[in-house]
Amino acid sequence: MDQQRQFGRQSENNSGSVPGGEGWCMGVTIQDNKWAYAMVLLILTLLWQSFQGANGLPSLPLIEFRSEQEAIEAYFSQGFQYKAIVIFLGLYHGIHLSLRTLKRRIRSYGLSRRGFASQSPLHFVYQAIRRELEGTGRLGGYRSMWQRLIRKYHLRVTQEMVRLLLRQIDPISVENRRLSRLQRRTYISQGPNHCWHVDGYDKLKIYGFEINGCIDGFSRRIMWLECNHTNHKSSIICKYFLDTVRQMGMICPKIVRTDCGTENSLLAPVQCSLTNSSHGHRYGTSPSNQRIEQWWSFLRRNRSTYWINLFEDLTEEGHFTVGNSLQIECLRFCFMDLLRKDLQEAAVFWNTHRIRPSRYASCPAGIPDELYFLPPNGRDCKVDVSHQDWDMFYNFTEANSVCQDGELEEFLQFLMETYNLIYPENVDDALELYLRLKALTCD
């Protein structure tokens, strides 16, 4: 992965960063000075990375920021702690700030978390919640809704206010969520990239949409979440894996765990070859692959139920027939891009939300992105991958497509141009386009 763009100013003099104008001294204790704690942590991290060689630093797949303020605001809006922001800026963007300077920058930018002294107008919050409740937002709780408001709409509102508004706007869904509880099993992992869990999701299969995902067992970070016309072709699943290997900076996990499906028949030998170990891949039953199976339940509650209900309504109204290949292809053509966008949004929201502590979990609590790129124990189980090996295996993969029948997809594109139809930007547009294409091709 290309090296991140370097910019920003160098760190200020120590005498200007430590209260009282005093320089750095060995007498400052970590317990007494948060600035010292952050800088010591940054120095130790850099030293540790130096022993890992040139490829020891993982590549953080973030956008290139144009200014220091943009970088700080982006990390701040993602909910990272101040110490983590200091380390991210220093390691990945060449911006070396003390913790005290960072706090001063944040105050000068008008950013605030605690209490949100200057909250957004209540009617804006109310309208955003109502808009989210029209889609997949109705499936999540107030914490999920709060995250959507601050990430997607950039609103400043407390979780308590969101909880009260949800109870007022949608009391039935609030009560239904209160009565549902999940019991999770204990999971043990050595660190990031120790084990990636891969599995398919077939709840939307009868409508022509098959989903495949991967989650890091330690950090619970979603590594990929893709939708295609099939998730049972080994060349497609292997492409998801190799694309992620490249995105992460040419590294792969120590272990990949999958079920015994034929779609993993290419991924298994590729993983073993990249790690140079016969134990690099593990087969197991799908229910026992608990990390990704648990995440599918989250996806069902917060996203896929909306799409299932939408397509079931189409079926009940007589606009869609299960098993009709031509109608399935039309449905894919109209809804595939919207569903992929929704899945990517779900992955981003998950990777930047905070996982609460649990007395039954052995893995630490925190934000998945932060746990993956800045592990608390400093241990990364990644395995470096050579470009030569990656290129060799990538030749056996297959690119993503919308429809299973390529000729039919070209014909639908021809109809779009002939009748001056517009590609959908939302669900209502997609429904209208589907009914129009169905009338032109199926009736």
Image: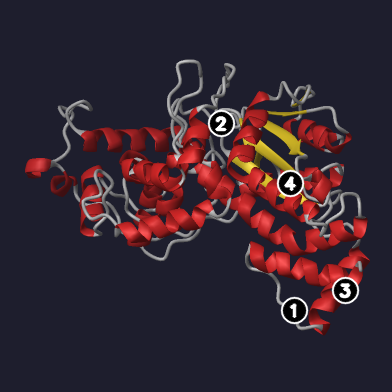
Kind of residue indicated by mark 3: Leu
CA distance separating discs 4 and 3: 34 Å
Indicate which label's residue lies in the foreground, 2 or 3: 3
Q: Nearer the viewer, mark 2 or mark 4?
A: 4
388 horizontally vs 245: left or right: right
Q: Are marks 1 and 4 in contact (CB under 8 Å)?
A: no
* Amino acid beneath label 1: Leu
Q: Is residue 299 left or right of residue 154?
A: right
Residue picked out by circle 1: 421
Q: Nearer the viewer, residue 189 or 384?
A: 189
C-alpha span from label 2 to label 3: 51 Å
Q: Sequence-wise, which precedes: disc 1 or disc 4? A: 4
Disc 2 versus disc 1: distance between alpha carbons?
46 Å
Q: Are marks 4 and 3 in contact (CB under 8 Å)?
A: no
Which is more foreground, mark 1 or mark 3? 3
Residue shown at the point (82%, 52%) measured from the top left: 229
Q: Residue at x 86, y 71 (%)?
A: 439
Mark with earlier residue (2, 1): 2
Q: Quadrant of residue 46?
A: top left
Q: Earlier in the sequence, mark 2 or mark 3?
A: 2
Q: Which residue is mark 3?
A: 440
CA distance for labels 1 and 3: 12 Å
